[in-house]
Image (cartoon, rainbow, N blue to C red):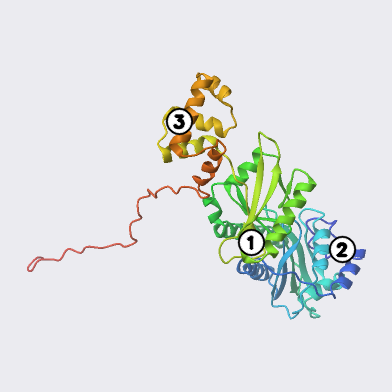
Amino acid sequence: MLDVGKTPPVDRRNHLNGSPIAIHLDNAIERPDLATPTADLPLYRWFADGLTRLIACERCYVAILSPRGERIDEVRTGCPVADPVPEAAVLAIASRLGAQDGCIFQSIASAHGFARRLIGRESTLCPHCVIGRVQSPSGSAALFVGGWRRTSLSGEEFASVTRAIDLMWDAAADLAQLRMQRQWSWLEDIASPAFVVDENLVVRSMNAGFRHLLGTSGALVVERGVISGSNPSITALLKDAVCRTIRSDSTQRARGSAVVLSNDKQKFLFAVTGPVPGDRDPGLVLIVVPQFDAVAGARRIAAAFTLNWVEERIVSRILRGRCPRVIGTELGLTEETVRTYIKRVMMKIGINRQSEFFVLHNLTSSPFKARQPDRRVPAMPNVTRIHVRRRRNGAS
């Protein structure tokens, strides 16, 4: 049972003592089943070591959970147990603890047999441990068990410890997220909306263009870190393209796969999947949603073929799908004048069909953003020179 005489838990409803889940956990923990670790271990090791020193114990077990509730890694400090803990057992404990807010409490070894299997058997003189689940604002969570202590924490000590644990986990999760953002900073160089997912469509990173697309278009939705289309069929096609990209060889992966996200004539969208560049995780896929900008495309074509201002505006409207009559109405020209301009532009460029304007739009576009020159003033070197004025001979 919980040691509620001196230090009540943050939420007294978080009692596992005598509940069916405690028996289930004791049985489930005997089946080893550990997923491939992908966590940022140095930071989580720091959290486990800090937790051990904070609780003043020798052993600590920490399981890192994704925003979806899946275990992505585990860390042990001072524990004699070397066998991995089954993911089913960890998720069962986390689910039970996550049912309430502020689920950090003290316990004794006899109340929770699974704590012994996570951090090892306690001694007769040190039967107390601290068990809990903390979650950061970003959604990542940590399930931990720290022990063994000779005595339980007092009420004031326990309140301070729970607050410190929350702050430590927030710091570790924020640093891990910042490190991940730096790792995927190259995504911001891609002009079109782009993001990286795994085979389960869990979004690992995204650029600012894709964040804007999520807010302005309903073609794609991200819920609990997982991306999906506007309907189940689009989601299935997207997942199939991602899985084929991961499982195909290097030659086939270079081609990529295209998935239509929206057939709306005004908001037609499609996604292109391909391998993540560089020597990164082969289980990840880069997805780009190309954006069609008629004004910018016409500007590039005009610059490449020295078109005048009127010709550029006509090309821009051709790229928008306008016919000569509508173009003339918008620009205050007759339909015949517009047709004459179009023929003149096509002769300048050297094309025979208006559809080739769209080809030129793609050929003159770059998948990467134009880098702005760094106009920052270089920092002064961190050197301080001290000039000592020498005294002249005979000076007093």
Look at label 2 and name its amino acid: Leu
Q: Residue extending furthest front? A: 352
User: As rendered, which of 112 and 237 lies closer to the eye?
Assistant: 237
- Return the disc, 1 or 2, that comes first in the chain's sequence: 2
Residue assigned mark 2:
16
Residue assigned mark 3:
344
- Label 1 secondary element: helix
- Label 2 secondary element: loop
Can residue 201 be seen at all in this image of the molecule? no
* CA distance separating discs 3 and 1: 42 Å
Q: Position of residue 304 (x, y in %)?
A: 42, 41
Tell me if mark 2 has few (under 14), some (14-19) or many (20+) residues whose alpha carbon lies within 10 angstroms of its own: some
Q: Which mark is residue 253?
A: 1
* CA distance separating discs 2 and 3: 81 Å
User: Which quadrant, please, contains the N terminus?
Assistant: bottom right
Look at label 3 and name its amino acid: Arg
Residue at 62% from the left image edge and 47% from the top image edge: 289
Look at label 1 and name its amino acid: Arg
Q: Position of residue 340 (x, y in %)?
A: 48, 26
Q: Eyeballing the image, is 139 above or below 43?
A: above
Q: Eyeballing the image, is 60 above or below 206?
A: below
